[in-house]
Image (spheres, rainbow, N blue to C red):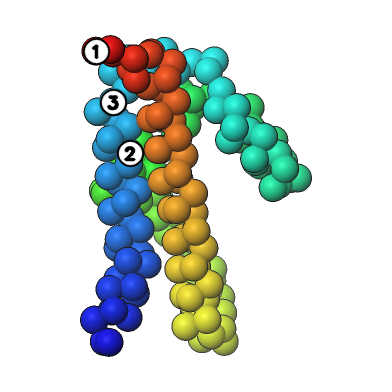
Amino acid sequence: MMQISDSYNQKNSLFNAMNRFIGAVNNMDQTVMVPSLLRDVHLEMEEKEEVLNHSNGAANYCSRRDMHGYYILLKSIRNDIEWGVIQGEDRKKDKLTNMDIARLEDADREEDLEKQFHYHLSGLHTVLSKLTRKANVLTNRYKEEIGFGSWGH
């Protein structure tokens, strides 16, 4: 019984979610031979779904993004996961004054870090799942656009 629950937890781990996302983006990257063909091609099904599910400005921005924009975004996020975003974090730290650092440390002591961790972990897992679906949809849509499914028949 222990193995069943362990495998279920492992399936839903952040590490596995990241691996699924990276695998989907790698597959997308290997499938899309001519990324410029993605320009001005929209993910129609995805657009309708986003507009129905979200009514904020971010959804409106994303719904106007073409497949090329998603392709670039997904590859960029994959690179951030694989190589880290330390450069950006280092630049932010350089801009902080000693007084800013002291205020941040005081805030950290007062807040429940475990609760914050679980909140962000859950959010990250959700976002990675959505991005993985986007990469898979983009890959399949690209195949449709170039007629990949009808090759060899």
Say which of 127 and 47 sits in front. 47
Q: Position of residue 127 (x, y in %)?
A: 49, 54
Circle 1 Cα neighbour tier, 10 Å, few/some/many (<14 / 14–19 / ≥20): few
Residue that label 2 marks: 25
How far is disc 1 from disc 2 in space, using C-alphas?
Answer: 25 Å
Instruction: Indicate which disc, 1 or 2, sits on the residue closer to the N terminus.
Output: 2
Discs 1/2, front = 1
* Residue at the disc numbered 1: 152
SS assignment at label 2: helix
The answer to which image quadrant residue 6 occupies is: bottom left
Q: Hey, what amino acid is under mark 1?
A: Gly
Picture disc at residue 31: 3
Percent x, y of residue 136:
40, 38
Specify the amino acid type for callout 2.
Answer: Val
| Label 1–label 2 contact, CB within 8 A | no
Q: Amino acid at mark 3?
A: Thr
Callout 1: SS: loop
Residue pictured at 41% horizontal, 46% vertical: 132
Q: Secondary structure at mark 3?
A: helix
Report the mark closest to the observer, 3 or 1.
Answer: 1
Would you call the spot at circle 2 few (<14 residues within 10 Å), some (14-19), or many (20 or more)?
A: many
Q: Earlier in the sequence, mark 3 or mark 1?
A: 3
Residue 54 seen: yes
**Residue at image location 48% in from the left, 15% down from the top:** 39
